[in-house]
Amino acid sequence: MYILNDNTIYDEEGNAYPFLKGFLVETGNGSIFPATFHETTKGPDEYIRRIRERACLRDPNWDNRLLETYDIESDQFTIAYVSRGKRYLKYIESLRNQSDEELCNTYLTVPIPMTPHNIFVIRRDLEKLFQVPNWEEVFPFRRPRTFFRSIDGGWAMRTSEHNQILKRTANRVCQGRYNIQ
């Protein structure tokens, strides 16, 4: 599907920007619809995911692989570990020192003007990266971060306690103690 050319519109000053900022794919039949997504629907740990997107560019283990996986059947969202070495931290430090214009040139893949909000989000993410310098705190034992849908409709992170409960339940099901319909 080629939409980039058809997705570009221009303002009065000749600046190009995308007409559609998102789209929804109905996987059952392949239909594609224009969509706008509210901040709360973007999934859990958004800043961790954005940092990982940039880190995986320098991690050959992630070539041609999906970074996040949403499992429809279990309604779980899994964020896998990506390595983040000292060279990557130096790269991030260099980004932190760039001007707003330089950041735009580094981050943008299409010729659109970067809004002050976009710059704010990028700089916020770069700062958060340095607030948690030890990546093992984010991904203990290099294990993925798994989220499940909470009662209020938001996302809650599955902890080792949740994993133990799931294992015990699975063992009981296998032993015939629970009849799962």
Image: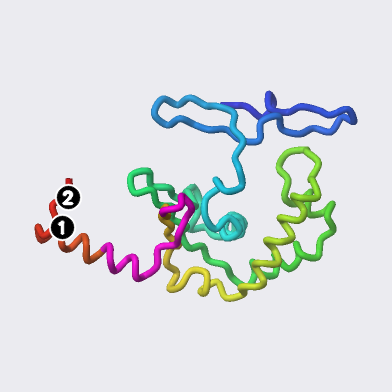
Q: Say which mark, if any, is on residue 173.
A: 1
Quadrant of the frame with the C terminus? top left
Q: Are marks 2 and 1 in contact (CB under 8 Å)?
A: yes
Front one among 85 and 154 = 154
Q: Is residue 135 visible?
A: yes
Q: Residue at x 65, y 67 (%)?
A: 129
* Sequence-wise first label, 2 or 1: 1
Q: Residue at x 33, y 44 (%)?
A: 73
Quadrant of the frame with the N terminus? top right
Query: In the image, 82: left or right of 88?
Result: left
Residue that mark 2 sits on? 180
Tell me the amino acid under the disc marked 1.
Val
Q: Secondary structure at mark 1?
A: helix
Query: In the image, 122: left or right of 46?
Result: right
The spot of residue 78 in percent (x, y) is 43, 55
* Other-residue count near label 1 (Cα within 10 Å), few / some / many at <14 / 14–19 / ≥20: few
- Residue range corresponding to the magenta coloring: 151-166
Q: CA distance from mark 2 to mark 1?
A: 7 Å
Q: Can residue 174 be found in the magenta stretch?
A: no
Q: Say which mark, if any, is on residue 12.
A: none
Q: In this picture, is 62 found above or below 91? A: above
